[in-house]
Image (cartoon, rainbow, N blue to C red):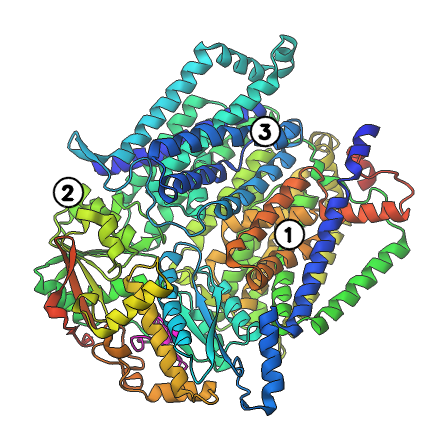
Amino acid sequence: MRGVTGGRAGRRWLPLLAVLATVALVASACGDDDGGGTASEGDADAASGSGGGGNGECDSPGVSDDQIKIGQLSSLTTPAAAFYGLHQAGFKARIDKLNDDGGIGGRQVVIETADDAADINRATTAARELVEQQDVFAVMVASSVIAGPASYLQDEGIPVVGYNVNPEWGVYDNMFGYSGSNSPEPVATTTGGEFLTQQGVERLAILGYAQTSAQAAAEGMQESFEAAGGEVVYNSTDAPIGTSEWTTQAEEIASRGADGLYLPIQTQNALAAAAAVRQAGGDLKVTLFPAGYSPTTLEQAGDTAEGVYFSMDFVPFEVQLPAHQEMLNALEQYAPDTPPAQEVAVGWIIGELLIRGLQEAGEECPTREAFIENLRQVSDFDANGLLDPPVDFEASFGQPYGLCFHYVKVEGGEFVPVNDGEPICGEVVDEG
Amino acid sequence: MNVLIVSGLVFGGIYAVASLGLVLTYVSSRIFNFAQGALAFFIALLFYELNTERGWSTWSAALVAIGVVAPLLGLALWAVLFRRLSSAPTTVQLVATIGLYVAIPPIAKTLFVADEPSLPPGFFSAPVPEVDVFGVTLNANQIAVFVSAVVVGLALALTLRFTMFGLTMRGVVDHRPLASVMGINPGVVTAAAWMIGTMMAGLAGVLLTPVLGLNEVSFSVLLISSFAAVVVGRLRSFTWTFVGALGLGLAQTLVTKVLPESGWMARAARPSIPFVVMILFLVAYGLVLHRRGGEEAPTTALLTRTPGTGVAPWYARVLIGVALVVAAFLIPELLTSFWLGVVASGVAVGIALLSLVLVTGEGGMISLCQISLAGIGAMGAAQLTEFYGWPNIPAILVAALAAVPFGVLVAVVSLRLGELYLALATLSFAVLADNALFSIDRIDNLHAGQPLPRPSLFGFDFDSDVRFYFLALGVFAVAALLVLNVRRSTTGLTLAAIRSSEVAARTIGVSTERAKVATFAIGAFIAGVGGGLVASFSGRATPPSFNAVIGIVWLAVVVTWGLRSVVGALLAGVAFSLFPALFSAYIPDSYAEVPTMLFGLGAIIVAREPRGIVAQTVGHWRHLLRLDRRRDDNDTVAVEPSAQAA
């Protein structure tokens, strides 16, 4: 027993050290709060503090003589990251290019990222961290879990740009979606239903994840398709996010004789679902993915993507506008490993929107109030032609997402624009 | 229909491979490896890293991951951890494997691919070859599952029955000392069992990858489901485990035939089946075992040593108390609002963790469902405020009261169970709460939950972070006093007697049932209040924040900081909230997993020093300062806890 005791004496120091280390960690964290998190931030603070009497005279939060700090709130871990991580890549490429081109009003735009791990409570903490700790001027949001942070950012008067899939984008007037707004309550548009019936679909099946945006898309499509005279034979949005095991659902879809399948889920899993329906003996005329328009999809899916339709709300790359080329060049330069995927393009357009907002906010000394007020007046935001028709932020506020869509179909291993790349636009489904 | 049977057999086959490995390690070492799913995740991620990220061929990646790394990992775990724990009390073994369960996935994600791959390939990658068998299209990955299950099952059966190794192993399982006398080294047999068991975990992981993707949560929940098969086999029968595994898989898919296509039932029923089965079997065993006179009576837990081994003199305790109060008032002065908020929410978590101090620390009962009781408090309060317009504080108190019957139910069901079965039963309750209760549409609201505003009392709002901090501290102090009073009450003394020896306590006429039920009831109320405050801090009560898997982390954290100490619960709560926030603020995102890793490792370390960091450190300081003259050495005193408690 004595020997054992002697051997353990050293180990008894470990927990003590652990406690001391914790205290030190906490203490250093507290100390940093006043001095700025890192050396560079400290410098920036000092610059803005002492520069008050210099040429700047700008005391807007997050704005120093040579920098504007922007927060980015995204789901960067968990399965949601496969989607929102791509937004980040496109957004960052646009901002990198902006900075190389001289920034905004001589200031470089610096991005501070925060991960919400696709968890609402984490999202609120992350938003608070960006605003209160990082002192950012505005926030870019690419996430589905924004109920908490949205009301917080509204209360603090922070300008928000991002991916407008949740109803909050149509509730809070400080939030600007890349393609406009969203409806506070779910509202269907005629666009998708009319497109599918035109392609000859009569019996539609819908399969999605248990996730606000997917369920809204599924409900919207059901109403839209029924308004166009079709029958929805299956609609399930209960699968946990990330599931790729679709056997039971596929069995039902096939046995109910569906001839169309709408899949508001991640592309890879959507391909698995389509394959499962085939395995179960289903005979589908049209499979429509509202996401996943990307060369990666073609590569990975091979023949299985043949005949699949994709929808998007920007002009597809195959139309080859100068803005497309600009984006492809920038991706090659700043994010060489990133494919020009649908979500990357959306991230890029969010970058364009941020730049527009900062220009509207006053280049000399941008203020949050001016950003919000002036960007709301903009009626012609087209991201250099990528958005057709352009967005009118005043008129579109509270209007549903996706009144106009572009469609492409996979033919011979390539994307081919439907309707010559022109948008197909609908209207709000009449509830009566 | 045939497709459903195929799908059911796929899940059943994966359950079978995983659960047979679990039974193998259990019978040979008497340690129930909670971390089986975590090991499966580790090997599956390694396989993905080698195969997809580094471009190795499928077969070389599989050979290295499952054939080389998995057995080495099993051997290492046995050598470092399980060998020492083989004669430790069940509670300690459980805590160690729970620590592994928590620590391994973050280690895997830090070592290998950081981003979660979408649709990772299994043994066969896309396009997966397909064949028609009896009119059903089977893909190669599905066939791989069937082949693996059959081969593993047969190999185990044949090896155990017909080989020398099998004979040796059966000998060790039957009578370890006798086997030793016969010149068999039980250590070698056990080590081999751990190596094979880990290989089977890894095989199950790779088989599961194309079905579920590489998400650690869905992975571990699915493999926890396979525990039900192990329970069906009563932790020793390979045949019944195999049958149970296939039956579970089939039941889970065939049930969809009779379920609606969407809505609550569709979501709840399928994942709940294994846990309902598990609870039914456990209850049945409890009844049968009781009639036979308590075959698996709980062993005295090392965890429940009284911290009073040498109580500090009054002046030292006053000093510590004053220091704590001063610190509590200094913290708001030192921290910015953001960090104060992080600490405040940690204090709220600490309240919920007090229920673990009571139920597991005092009561000696490992409960993995305290988080669900906290969730009932949180989500019940949100329902009352959002849909019935209740003010916040009465809503939280009433919702916490609503958690009490659930706590009592858990207690009544698990009264007769030994420590391991109790842990499995409470875990089942937690998963059932996630699947069946928190998934109700108006509670879950697509994981967004319902709003729960911060409290106000007689017109005084606790809306700012400072006010909420003091409110949480106040509630914590009241709850801590409650726990300390229970410790000193008749119930507390009864619990101490039970911890010492339940049989002896019953013999002298102590009503152990009443004490246990009372403990669970009070614990449920405390957990409910804590849960309500946790949710109201962030403004929403959301089911993912009260997930069973997080509950396992809770246990690991509170064990690390001291399961018998109310101060430990406070520090554990603050650590649970603060560590991830600190890492996210100051450390690159690639290390985001480190806090969880530390929580798990903490529990593993504590399995060797069961009173946690606080008790250990205090004891050490006392020793250093010569305050404690009655006991020369705290560490060597591991026996006779009742002597001090009484």
Q: Is residue A1 above or below residue B547?
A: above
Q: Amino acid at mark 1?
A: Ser
Query: Residue B419, image x and y in percent?
Result: 61, 35
Residue wearing tag 3:
B78
Query: Residue B272, image x and y in percent?
Result: 41, 44
**Real-space CA distance between mark 3 and mark 2, rounded to the nearest whole angstrom:** 48 Å
Labels 1 and 2 in the same subunit? no
**Real-space CA distance between mark 3 and mark 1, rounded to the nearest whole angstrom:** 32 Å
Q: Is residue B341 above or below residue B292?
A: below
Label 1 marks which chain's residue? Answer: B
Would residue B315 be found to the left or right of residue B406 on screen?
Answer: right
Q: Residue at x 36, y 37 (%)?
A: B56
Label 3 marks which chain's residue? Answer: B
Q: Nearer the viewer, residue A75 or A60?
A: A60
Which mark sits nearer the N-terminus, 3 or 1? 3
Q: Nearer the viewer, residue B36 or A411?
A: A411
Residue wearing tag 1:
B355
Crowd class of label 1 (few under 14; some 14 to 19; many from 20; radius 10 Å): many
Pointers 3 and 2 in contact (C-beta within 8 Å):
no
Q: Which residues are magenta?
A: A161-183
Q: Residue at x 53, y 75 (%)?
A: A131
For the stretch drawn in magenta, what is the main secondary structure?
loop
Give SS at disc 3.
helix
Q: Amino acid at mark 2?
A: Gly
Residue wearing tag 2:
A281
